[in-house]
Image (cartoon, rainbow, N blue to C red):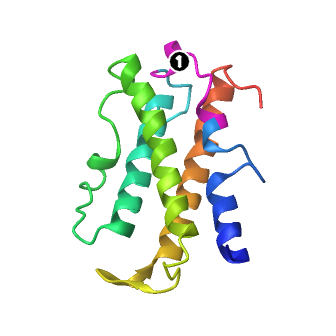
Amino acid sequence: MSDLRQEIVALLEGGSAHAGLEKGLQGVPSALLGKRAAGSAHTLWQLAEHIRIAQWDILEFSRDPAHVSPAWPDGYWPQTPAPPSASAWARCRKSIREDLAAMVALVRDPARDLLAPLPHAPDKCLLREALLVADHNAYHLGQFIGLRQRLGAWRG
């Protein structure tokens, strides 16, 4: 794997300059998932589910020319402050892990030219989409961990 691909994978997986997604999402008390701290626009559930939806959308856009993105902004945010069930939270975390692994696999695939225009979006390339996932995840993970701190549920 090229040095560039390795650096992108490291950025996607996190853990160098900040906690990775898995660490940030684990150990959250279920009673806090639907809580908002003073001054917070979202709950932990809303932030995690937004990460999941956006990451899935970027992944599918990157690999499926027929993919249709959700409507902005409503399709990217859950409507409820808390997950509808414990299994919904588990599915959210599992999907985040699996879709991140799928994006990493795309980046690692030597048959994919990171800089080639996407056939259905000639102004975009896989490198851009991978960096978008990394940037978006890091931004919202920072919000997520900050909210966990304000709710007393983070020991980084």
Residue 67 image offset from top left, x and y in percent: 25, 64
- Along the viewing direction, whichever of 29 and 63 lies nearer the viewer: 63
Q: How many labels does the image show?
A: 1
Residue 132 image offset from top left, x and y in percent: 52, 65
Query: What residue is rendered at 29% in x and 33% in y?
Result: 79
Residue 54 image offset from top left, x and y in percent: 40, 52
Q: Name the residue under label 1.
A: 32
In the image, is residue 31 part of the stretch drawn in magenta? yes
Task: Determine whether, in the image, residue 138 is placed left or right of residue 120.
Answer: right
In the image, is residue 36 part of the stretch drawn in magenta? no
The part of the chain drawn in magenta is 23-34
Query: What residue is rendered at 53% in x and 80% in y?
Result: 114
Query: What residue is rendered at 69% in x and 77% in y?
Result: 2
Residue 65 image offset from top left, x and y in percent: 26, 72
- Along the viewing direction, whichever of 153 and 67 lies nearer the viewer: 67
Amino acid carrying mark 1 in the image: Leu
Q: 10 Å neighbourhood of mark 1: few (<14), some, or many (≥20)?
A: some
Q: Quadrant of residue 38?
A: top right
- Along the viewing direction, whichever of 46 and 6 lies nearer the viewer: 6
- Along the viewing direction, whichever of 56 and 138 lies nearer the viewer: 56
